[in-house]
Amino acid sequence: MNAGSKSKKRVVLPRRPDPPTVEQILEDISRAAPDDPVFSVLDPRGPGPSQPAEGEVEQRFQQCRRFLELNEKLQEARSQLLQQREELKAAGEQLDRDVAEVKGQTL
């Protein structure tokens, strides 16, 4: 079997679940404890024990910026790798044709 004829198996992902209904969301909220992190982060009364200090906010902001920069670089690298893969695939297919042609000439 040559490299050009190998077939890739596609992974079939399971169907996404349906989003929750309004009733399910309200039920989930009603079951949540008052000290649930979601409620303390959204608390307009000011910083609580789970909220970051002022210096941590800047640090997290810089971490987020760096993450976004790295993510962009990764996306660019991914695009380059996909292009190089296609070029290598085309070169491999051409090589297979050339080898077949040479074999045909020697027979």
Image (cartoon, grey):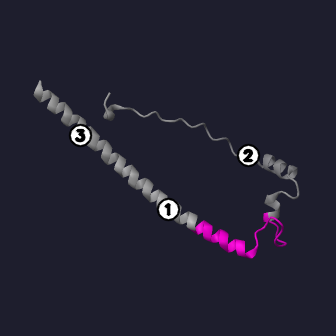
The mark that comes first in sequence, 3 or 2, is 2
Circle 1 sits in a helix, a strand or a loop, which is it? Answer: helix
The mark that comes first in sequence, 1 or 2, is 2
Residue 95: image location, x then y, percent: 23, 38
Q: Residue at x 23, y 40 (%)?
A: 94
Residues tagged 3 and 2 counted as in contact (Cβ below 8 A): no
Q: Quadrant of the N terminus?
A: top left
Q: Name the residue under label 3.
A: 94
Q: What stretch is highlighted in magenta?
A: 41-65
Q: In this view, does 28 lie to the left or right of 13?
A: right
* Rendered position, 90 above or below 45: above
The CA distance from mark 1 to mark 3 is 33 Å
Frontmost residue, 89 versus 59: 59
Which one is closest to the eye, mark 3 or mark 2? 3
Looking at the rendered structure, the kind of residue marked 3 is Gln
Q: Name the residue under label 2.
A: 20
